Image (cartoon, rainbow, N blue to C red):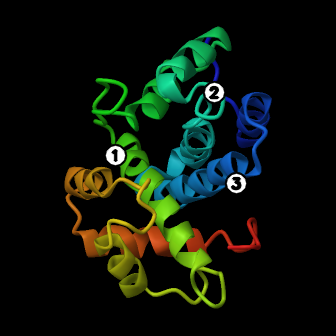
Amino acid sequence: MPYIPTVDEARKILEKYNQDAFHLRHGEIVSGVMGYFAKEYDPERVDFWRAVGMLHDLDFERWPEEHCVKSQELMKELDLDPELIRATASHGWGIRVDIEPKLMMEKVLYAVDELTGLIGAVALVRPSRSIMDMEPKSVKKKFKDVKFAAGCSRDVIRKGAEMLGWTMDELISKTLLAMKSLKETIPDL
């Protein structure tokens, strides 16, 4: 019978396929951001959203060319819940897979995955090297500079905001607040 891993179990699964500190940290950040949004949009399933966030890049470190495809295989072998598998794969929509984000959880993941990376990159060029004193305008300024953190797809972030029915300002502000809420669990933000 398919199962939904706890956040700790999801972390162990992620660690089985990823050793790079960057990928593990990204999983923690996206998990936390997903949990933040779940409290508002799906409060009965905060841990489910967090597990989705933790596992969304399960295959990226070892199989970057099969990203969002290989992860489905791995998760099916682990007999994980089909909704979790679909949600994690949907963040690769239009790039690696044809699984369009439909549920709120999927749309949030699609929108925040790249944006959390951009926000993290903005933090690295700040004197404080932290998001804690960062304002949305700093993110917006760097968002416009396509050479800055060029690997963070602005198109995906824009599409994510559109899917959610949010302005870019709303998406950036909400995601920054979500990341700031993680200070207790990820102290070096």
Image quadrant in which the C terminus is located: bottom right
Foreground tag (1 vs 3): 3
Residue found at x 51% / y 75%: 122
* Amino acid found under the numbered disc labelled 3: Arg
* Residue 5, x across and y down, in percent: 69, 30
Asked if 150 appears above or below 8 in the picture, the reply is: below
In front: 98, or 39? 98
**Which of the two labelled residues, at mark 1 and mark 3, occupies the earlier sequence position?**
3
On screen, residue 72 above or below 114? above
Disc marking residue 25: 3
Name the element at disc 1: helix
For the point 71% across and 42% down, which residue is it?
7
Q: Please tell me which residue lies in front, 159 or 106.
A: 159
Q: How far apart are the alpha carbons under marks 3 and 2?
A: 21 Å
Judging by the rendered image, the residue that carries numbered circle 2 is: 4
- Are discs 2 and 1 less than 8 Å apart at CB? no
